[in-house]
Image: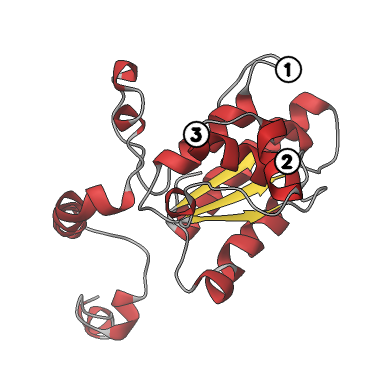
Amino acid sequence: LLESMVDLPTMTSPAAAAVPVKSIHELERDFVVFAKHSEKVSLNLCRWLPDLRLRPLVPGEVCAIVADTGVGKSAFAQNIAMHAAPLTVLFFQLELPGTLMFERFAQMTSGHSGDAVYQGFRNGGFAYDDTKLSHIWTCDRSGLNPDQIGKLVEQSVQKIGRPPAIVIVDYIGLVSGKGERYNRISDAVEKFKIIAKNTDTVI
């Protein structure tokens, strides 16, 4: 037995370092780093809505917003994206065309109606505060499944120049998949949890 143990890798060997198992002290080390830098990577919705009284969402977490059709989930998601600054946001808009999404963002930053935004740009220009939106990147392709979304999250660094901190998917009912609606959504949520952990993002 002692002879066979001699051949085992030590804790400092490259083989041991490659094993995805952590001691409590390694977890502590990770937590210390996280605690010192969490403000830079966490989504604190209470800065926008103080009455929520929620802890900030940290990388690896998934948050689902559930509501009836037409009550404003997309507008809520866009407000989350805008108020997440300076964190980089990758917004998957599966329902609205990118043009309408832009119009809504321009409304939010200018305080004008959608028609005023439309008419302003149609007549030569419109003043809106793009500095409140420069941290947001959008994919308005429809019919994406969770695996495709995960791949695009990883590939987005090529376009953005850095990994996104926040990923928003609007809305989960339009995520492509197999089976009944409930099973499809449940499967998507499970896959999004894996993507969140593997990409170190808040979804």
Q: Kindly identify which numbered label has been placed on residue 141.
A: none
Of labels 1 and 2, the one closer to you: 2
Residue 110, percent from left and from top:
51, 37
Q: Mark 1 or mark 2, which has the lower sequence index?
A: 1
Is residue 20 among what the camera can see?
A: yes
Q: Earlier in the sequence, mark 2 or mark 3?
A: 3
Pointers 2 and 3 in contact (CB under 8 A)?
no
**Disc 2 crowd, CA 10 A, few/some/many (<14, 14-19, 20+):** some
Asked if the residues shown at circle 1 and circle 2 are in contact, with their CB atoms under 8 angstroms apart, the answer is no
In the figure, is residue 88 to the left or right of 24?
A: right
On the image, numbered disc 2 is attached to which residue? 118
On screen, residue 191 versus residue 8, left or right, reads right
Q: Quadrant of residue 93?
A: top right
Viewer-nearest residue: 5 or 51: 51
Image disc number at residue 79: 3
Question: Residue 181 sits in which quadrant?
Answer: top right
Instruction: Return the residue nearer the eye: 72 or 28.
Output: 72
Q: Report the residue marked by disc 1.
A: 69
